Amino acid sequence: MLIYASLTAILGIVVGIAHSVLGERVLLGPLYREPTSGVLANRSSRDIIRAVFHIPSIAWSGLAIAVLINRMQGGSDLLPLTAMIIFALSGIGNLAALRRPHPGGLILLTMAAATLADIEFK
């Protein structure tokens, strides 16, 4: 059903933007403002870390939008199934790494469930 694919797309955009914006403000910004003589002293290392941090945001948003477009075009279940696995693994990884419930991990698991519902109730 289009409602589940739409929910996945909306949540994917929300979690992608939140991950990037809050990550810059709460984690990367303060980390890069600290004086350092280690790995973070090198500008290219900082740029690589920043890029690697933002890649999941782009992937989650892009995959979520692709799930919606796939459903609108009557595509196969391969793309949503792949996206569902990525959302679920990302959510589980987030919760395991933080060792507590976190909004991002919970949203990713909700996206996985909505994608599964999209596959089952097309």
Image (cartoon, rainbow, N blue to C red):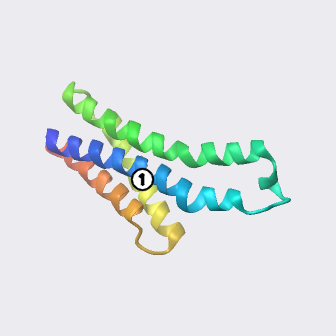
Query: As drawn, is 19 to the left or to the right of 39?
Result: left
Quadrant, the C terminus: top left
Tell which of 86 and 43 is nearer to you. 43
Placement of 59 over or under 20, stated as above or below = above
Which residue is most to the bottom?
100
| Residue at (22, 41) in percent of width and height | 5
Q: Which residue is mark 1?
A: 18
Disc 1 crowd, CA 10 A, few/some/many (<14, 14-19, 20+): some
- In which quadrant of the rendered view does residue 39 lie? bottom right
Q: Nearer the viewer, residue 44 or 98?
A: 44
Which quadrant of the view contains residue 35?
bottom right
Vertical order, 90 against 80 (above or below): below
Q: Amino acid at mark 1?
A: Ala
- State which quarter of the image contains the N terminus: top left
- Residue situated in front as seen by the camera: 81 or 93: 93
Residue extending furthest toward the top: 73
> In the rendered image of this protein, does residue 93 appear above or below residue 101?
above
Q: Residue at x 30, y 36 (%)?
A: 67
> Can the viewer see residue 110?
yes
